[in-house]
Image: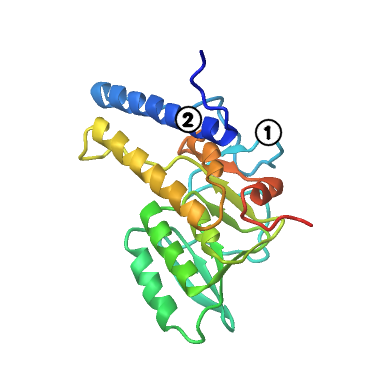
Amino acid sequence: MSTMPKNPVARTLMGVLIFQIGLGGLLVIGDMRGLRLPSFGPDAPRLTEPVRPGDQRRTFRPDRDRPVVQPARDPGQLPERLVLTQSNGSTYRLEGGIEAGDAARIADQLDTVQPAPETVILQSPGGSVQDALALGRHLRNKGIATRMLAGEFCYSACPYLLAAGPTRDIADDASVGVHQHYFGENTFLPAAFAVEDIQRGQAEVMTYLDEMGIDPLVMTHALSTPPDQIYVLLPDELERYGFTQTSE
């Protein structure tokens, strides 16, 4: 007799749990044998190639890869950590990698700049998940809307900032992408403990997304996409998972 739950959401979450158990096994084996966690599936094309339904994984190195869409302005080399700058009136830009400590630093700036921010425009290759979640909660508590402009991108941990806006304005040609959270080779924890941390972290992320009104099932794409790739969400997926409002 099958023990799989009948509810489709429960089945999906069980699948995520099974995936994590398998991931844990790979990490333990890697820890014992000095192996790196492999990528799953065929090699993905470069991020500069157009994305089509069913063909949405692209190779991704934050210091090298940019999406094929063209931004309205050339940002040049993005800063290594988040930078807050005024764009126009109460609209600000938040750009750059998300580094440890950025949440507290940017939250202090958001609390003190004048005029008070009503909207932040995001562009980031991602970075520290914990800082993205903490800063995202600060954005939500402050009621600061989030926006993405045509040709700009928000990857890895950045979508957690995007999700935080009580209203979210995402241009059709903006690029939003997710993948597995990266855990580097240089860790002080044995793999068995790292697996526990991964599972705890994924639970925290899914709880956060639910708080923000985002369907946690978006994590099925993240969990199945290796850290050296990015899964680019199509407009209908952004709508399905709640990043954009449902069309009338």
Residue 76, image x, y percentages: 55, 62
Disc on the earlier residue, 1 or 2: 2
Q: How many marks?
A: 2
Vertically, is 38 above or below 53? above
**Residue under the image location 44 percent in, 26 percent down:** 18
Of 80 and 215, which appears nearest the observer? 215
**In the image, is 133 to the left or to the right of 195?**
right
Residue under circle 2? 14
Residue 27, image x, y percentages: 32, 28
Vertically, is 47 above or below 44? below
**Residue under the image location 56 percent in, 43 percent down:** 218
Q: Is residue 98 visible?
A: no
> Which quadrant does the C terminus fall into?
bottom right
Q: Is residue 70 visible?
A: yes
Residue 197, image x, y percentages: 30, 41
Residue 156, image x, y percentages: 49, 49
Q: What element carries label 1?
A: loop
* Amino acid marked by disc 1: Gly
Q: What element carries label 2?
A: helix
Residue under circle 1? 54
Counting other residues with Cα less than 10 Å from the Cα at mark 2, is it few (<14), some (14-19), or many (20 or more)? some
Of 219 and 155, which appears nearest the observer? 219
3D distance between C-alphas at marks 1 and 2:
23 Å
**Residue under the image location 43 percent in, 64 percent down:** 137
Numbered tag placed on residue 104 in the rendering: none
* Front: mark 1 or 2: 2
